[in-house]
Amino acid sequence: MPAHHAGSDTVTVIGLGRFGEAVARRLAGLGREVLVIDTDADHIAAIAPSVTLAAEADATSEATLRELDVPDCGTAVVAIGEDLEASILVTAALADLGVPQIWARAVSEAHGRILRRVGAHWVVYPEQEMGERVGQLIYTGIEEYVSFPNGYALAIMDPPAWSIGLTVEQVGGSHDVSIIGLQVGDGPVEVPNPQHHIRREERLAIAGPTAAVDAFPMADS
């Protein structure tokens, strides 16, 4: 049995490729308890100082997952990508053990469909999503862009030239988006007054339906 007993707040990350390592380190940096499992001793040794528990083990074995208290964890992330068989077996084992939230990385739509069928609650496509995000940033010139699964998006940008001097209400209302934040330099993000006139030095945070955010004009309108 592990020295640390996992609880419902613990996140298990299985697979320490670049994606799995990034997830584990980010969660640990946010103060979450993180259990990582991988078959590569070097990967385990490298990340062990940064997480709650690092185990060199075969996560396709239900017995191993039980020994590591994985069924007691609230969330598990199957970060295995290229080894499709292992990815599917681990996801199915987690589902059989009753882990409440299972996130699984997929490398294709077909892989994702199988992961859902064997028990994944959420499937992510890191390569595809990053590619779409980079394409969006290149196309629009927007500084940051986040698309949410419910059909909404958020973007951060320098104010387009056409918006300078107009009010927050005018800019957002005329393009079916909401300006939810303003920031000057590295200062605090402030919720704007609808009648505030946009200034050149302010950075805008806009949110709304994905189609409206995507269509928000960055050139003169």
Image (cartoon, grey):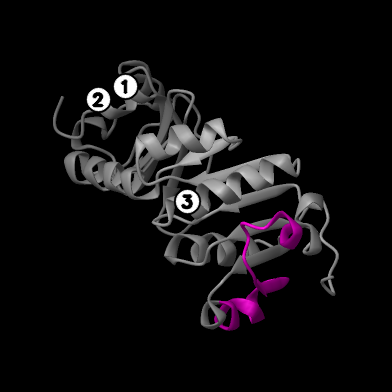
Q: CA distance from mark 1 to mark 3?
A: 37 Å
Per the rendering, the mark at residue 183 is: none
Pinpoint residue 186: horizontal percent, then vertical percent.
Answer: 45, 59
Residue for point 68% across, 40% down: 95
Q: Secondary structure at mark 3?
A: helix
In this picture, residue 213 sits left or right of residue 52: left
Q: Amino acid at mark 3?
A: Glu
Residue 196, image quadrant: top left
- Over which residues does the magenta segment extend? 44-65
Badge 3: residue crowd in 10 Å (few <14, some 14–19, many ≥20): few
Quadrant of the rendering where the C terminus is positioned: top left
Residue that carries the numbered disc 2 in the rendered image: 215
Q: Quick check: marks 2 and 1 in contact, CB under 8 Å?
A: yes
**Residue wearing tag 1:** 211
Residue 158 horizontal side relative to residue 125, left or right: left
Give the amino acid at mark 2: Ala
The structure residue drawn at horizontal position 59% and vertical position 46%, both measured from the top left corner, is 91
CA separation, marks 2 and 1?
6 Å
Local crowd size for mark 1, using a 10 Å CA cut-off: few (<14), some (14–19), many (≥20): few
Look at mark 3 in the image and give the residue it sits on.
85
User: Which one is closest to the eye, mark 3 or mark 2?
Assistant: 3
Q: Secondary structure at mark 1?
A: helix
Q: Are marks 1 and 3 in contact (CB under 8 Å)?
A: no
Q: CA distance from mark 3 to mark 2?
A: 41 Å
Which image quadrant: the N terminus? bottom right
Could you say where residue 48 lies in the image, as x and y percent from the top left? 64, 79
The answer to which image quadrant residue 103 occupies is top right
| The magenta stretch spans residue 121 | no
User: Could you tell me the amino acid type at mark 1?
Assistant: Ala
